[in-house]
Image (spheres, rainbow, N blue to C red):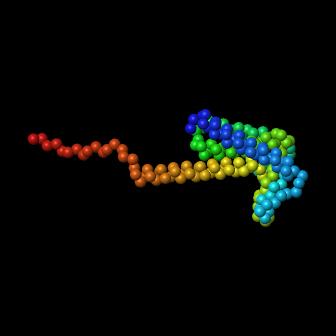
Amino acid sequence: MSIARRFLIFGLVTFLSIALDQVTKVLATDAFKGKPTLSYLGDTFRFQYATNEGAFLSLGGNLPANVRFWLLTVGVGALLLAITVQALRNPVDTANLTGYALIVSGGFSNWIDRARFDGVVVDFMNMGLGSLRTGVFNIADLAILAGIGVLLIAGWRQDRAAKAKAAAASTHPVASDPAPAPETPRQDG
């Protein structure tokens, strides 16, 4: 795949994902902030406004503010930049490129929140059955999980194809140069 095509796919997926996440966060803030939780489908799905100072599922939320800044703003920003450079510089297939773009876009959209809202991320969705529930999440979190899923499936397919190719090669060896014909004894006469 050409570098221009990689940039186009990566840029389009990233832009659309960030735009969707940021728009839904604005809508969620307007609709749910300061209001009671809305519950649907027998409390399977909830909409509620929440902020998160930590990473996924509030991991690191109790760390001191300066540590969170260096870890979740500077560190995550550097990691996202490294993933972006890696994905754009190396020839990968469309599935892998899309997976990387989803991860980067989700991380970057949450990174935008941290930069805009003094280190916190806006979350507004929660799912579960009874007492078994997810943490409160957003579209960026879904993009990250979708990107990981795409990479896992693409890797599984590539591994399966490589194993099938190796198996086919071992059962049907490639013909090499034909063996030389056996010499016939010379008869002088």
Q: In this view, does 133 lie above or below 86?
A: below
Question: Which of 111 and 128 lies nearest the eye of the viewer?
Answer: 128
Residue shown at 70%/42% (left/top)?
16
Instruction: Report the side of 108 relative to 66 (left or right).
Output: left
Residue shown at 81%/60% (left/top)?
39
Where is residue 61? Give x, y as percent.
83, 49
How many marks the image carries: the answer is: 0
Locate the C terminus and report the quarter of the image it occupies: top left
Residue farthest top in this picture: 4
Question: Which of 43 and 59 lies nearest the eye of the viewer?
Answer: 43
Where is residue 21? Give x, y as percent.
76, 46
Q: Quadrant of residue 83?
A: top right
Is residue 95 among the parts visible in the rendering? yes
Locate the N terminus and report the quarter of the image it occupies: top right
Residue shown at 64%/36% (left/top)?
7
Q: In this view, does 130 lie above or below 173?
A: below
Instruction: Report the side of 52 relative to 174 (left or right).
Output: right
Residue farthest left in this picture: 189
Question: Which of 149 and 38 lies nearest the eye of the viewer?
Answer: 38
Q: Is residue 149 above or below residue 74?
A: below
Question: Which of 23 and 157 lies nearest the eye of the viewer?
Answer: 23
Where is residue 144? Give x, y as percent.
71, 48
Residue farthest right in this picture: 34
Instruction: Report the side of 154 relative to 21 (left or right).
Output: left
